[in-house]
Amino acid sequence: MTSYDSVLHADVPIPYKIIEETNSHLLEEPSKEHDTLIASLPLQPSIERPFTFQGNIRLYKDVWMSEVIIRGILVMQQRLKTRPTDIFLSSSPKSGTTWLKAMIFATLTRTNYLLDQHPLHTHNPHQCVTYMDLGFAIGRSQIIENVPSPRVMSTHLPYSLLPYSITESNCRIVYVWRDPKDVLVSMWYFVQKIMGGADKIATFDQFYEMFYQGLNNFGPIWNHVLGYWEESKRRPEKILFLKYEHILQEPVKCAKQLAHFLGCPYSEAEENQGVVDQIVELCSIKTLKNLDVNKDSNRAMSTTANVHISHACYFRKGEAEDWKCHMTKEMAKRLDTMIKEKFKGSGLHI
Ligand code: PAP
């Protein structure tokens, strides 16, 4: 008996990694059905050194994405069967995904594990909640269909590219976004770590320019944010729209908001016992970054196609306004001005 057997059949998520291990017989060969279509899509303009570790980036329905993710979208559109109890976490990369994966998973499972023995102590948040688009691209369709409810999955897809199965179902979506200037800085460091150093990738100035032109993976970022923003205004009970910087400022308030949205609000007794603070503490970068499972750079993700991303790569500073150490005031102003223009009239502010 593993310690997960008691919860395998209960209404509580268990780490995706456990599901994948116990269902390895359901692994399939990645689909090649869409390869010709993908190869015909426009390629991101290339420069000497790469912006990404994910190979070719192509334009699909006005969004720049890696080929593997485009394949994931096309397979998902055919095969994903959304359930009303599904919970999706969505974000543009480097906007707080790892944090929210931990927060959602910990919130939903808080009564099923003693917090000092919680799976987040032994599993990276990305092993608890999987990237579904990538999963569908690399032969995990059947495994994902076998995840017991309630399923928690994540995606970097913009709202416009979510499968109809999601947008037409009544499931919940949590969206997190972040000051694009800090997204850009975080992305630059992340790609460096994976590619083995700053000299192996484009310069910061080149990253900035690519980001400004909306050519980054899942870009342009302003369309990404606006898509979920508009939909969250239409369906606030189904789309929770969070900002990284607000969570940093008021983590307890946001943790309560999240629990309420997920349908499992904190009871008065839990609040009095300090459970909200304990969840916030468990999911803080300070705690997660110092756990052995997240420090050991040899423990690579198993679900990322052909790329080994150490758990440690997902944790850097976890602060607001680190862009001030990397951009001139002019660069910041230029990006802000353009994004303000894009957000004009939406009610959204950086
Ligand atoms: P992903 O899209 O590749 O999953 P994502 O988790 O969205 O990455 O972004 C990583 C950023 O979140 C890093 O920011 P930084 O580079 O500016 O430091 C990382 O440090 C930060 N981060 C990871 N975990 C947490 C956490 N628990 N609390 C706050 N920030 C976090």
Image: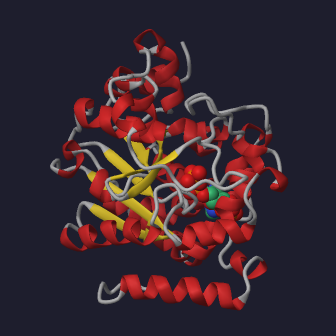
- State whether residue 241 is above or below residue 114: below
Viewer can see residue 218: yes
- State whether residue 35 is above or below residue 118: above
Q: Quadrant of residue 145?
A: top left
Q: Quadrant of the N terminus?
A: top right
Identified at 39% across, 57% down, the residue is 63
Quarter, ligand 1: bottom right
Which color scheme does this rendered protein use? Answer: secondary structure
In-front residue for pair 267/280 = 280
Farthest top residue? 25
Identified at 46% across, 26% down, the residue is 138
> Percent from the top left, x then y, of residue 277?
58, 63
Identified at 32% across, 61% down, the residue is 261
**On the picture, is 315 further left or further right than 149?**
right
- State whether residue 150 is above or below residue 139: below
In-front residue for pair 171/203 = 203
